[in-house]
Image (cartoon, rainbow, N blue to C red):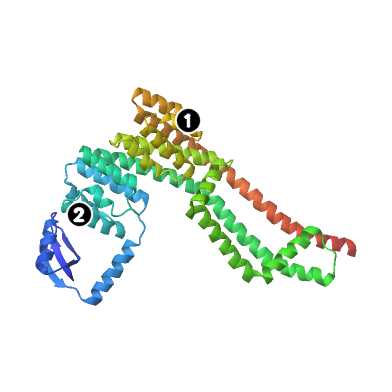
Amino acid sequence: MTVYQYKAINSHGKSVKGLLEADNPKALRANLKKQQIFVTEIKESSAKESQFNFSLSQQRMNKRVKVDEIAVLTRQLATLLKAGIPLVDSLSVLTDQTENGKLKVILGNVKQQVNEGRSLADSLKEYPEVFSNIFCNMIMAGESAGALEIVLTRLADFTENQARIMSKLKSAMMYPMVMIGVGAIVLGLLFTVVMPKITKIFTDMKATLPLITTILIGISNFLVHWWFLVLPFTIALIYGTYHFLFKTEKGRLFFDTMILKTPLFGPLTRMAIISRFAKTLSTLIASGVELLKALDIVKNIVNNKVIEKVIENARQEIREGESIAVPLKKSKEFPPLVVHMIAVGEKSGQLEQMLNNISNAYDSQVDAKVSALTSLLEPLMIVFMGIVVGCIVFAILLPILQMNELIK
């Protein structure tokens, strides 16, 4: 196939240009005409231009698409469809106004596939790194039920809510991570720059040093003389630990179990997971997805192996005729109040509403817990860093004070 550069006019009367592969100019015109794009000028692209534009396209495709961008896109698409604009035209509008290069390319490809008769859900499934499994399944349910704009509105609400929760959790973790990084740099400078100079003074004086000072000097000497072994060993240890905890089934299960049992972060993590579980399941059921399929989707978005196993067991028991509340109660991973509300929702036929109430309640608790945890972590980290640095300063000053006393 040959790469052609073209200039054209779209269905809205706007001038557009781009590159496209085709067997010949006639095939290119026919392909673009299907998308209601009418060519005014075509010329064959040189190899150098093709390579440059391919590299530019690759750079665009490597850009990250944020969750809030997907939320805005979803709400805009719902608004356009509610206004009576056809799907292909709505996708054209969104493609033109999107600033993210990767998302623009993806929307252009999706629009082309939809124009050729493919469903929107199947077209979006080609890009799993941007559109999640739950996103595509809800779109499929909306298309099947003929209520795509309603499902898109619910999906926009859901995506915005998930982005808000994740943003708060990241904000809560940011301060301690920064403090740990700064603390590591300070300690590294103390042990590798300050301590060796102090050690030389003590060695010249041949003074008897306190135990804490001897230990710190030993650590400093080890880091200064064996850094070429310490550095690769530390990197290997971090990489190995990361690979075990996040890339292996046993490691991930161990990590997720420990997270849920951690005094401060455990309850917060559990609340966030339950909120995500309830909101997602409620949204899927409201969108017409049947319960077993909905649970299969929810299982993949809770992001915790312990809860994932509980949902899978619940799914199997529901298949055998059990209610959803019973296996959740057996697991003891869901609070009694949540199990009770789900049971009441099943009996009254208002499971969707009950799940939504659970999600709203836990969202409020997550907000309160994150605020309290952020307020608590700041003074705790400052006190911890103060104690560590204070111990090092004390270890340095103690022998100096002792020598001053001897001199007097």
Badge 2 density bin: few <14, some 14–19, many ≥20, Cα 10 Å: some
Which residue shows up at 64% across the image and 63% down it?
188
**x and y percentages locating residue 19 in the rendered image:** 20, 67
Label 1, label 2: how far apart the Cα atoms are: 45 Å
Task: Report if residue 396 is visible in the image.
Answer: no
The quarter of the rendered structure image containing the C terminus is bottom right
Above-or-below relation of 9 to 316: below
Relative to 394, is 58 on the left or the right? left
Relative to 190, is 171 on the left or the right? left
The quarter of the rendered structure image containing the N terminus is bottom left
Q: Residue 11 carries which label?
A: none
**x and y percentages locating residue 72 in the rendered image:** 31, 47
Q: Which residue lies furthest to the front in this view?
A: 320
Residue type at tag 1: Lys
Residue type at tag 2: Gln
Q: Residue 329 carries which label?
A: 1
Above-or-below relation of 169 to 236: above
Number of residue marks: 2
Nearest the viewer among 41 and 34 is: 34
Quadrant of res 129 = bottom left
Which residue shows up at 50% across the image and 39% down it?
270
Per the image, label 1 sits on a secondary structure element best described as: helix
Above-or-below relation of 50 to 178: below
**x and y percentages locating residue 29 in the rendered image:** 11, 64
Quadrant of res 342 = top left
Badge 2 is on which residue?
113
Relative to 87, is 382 on the left or the right? right
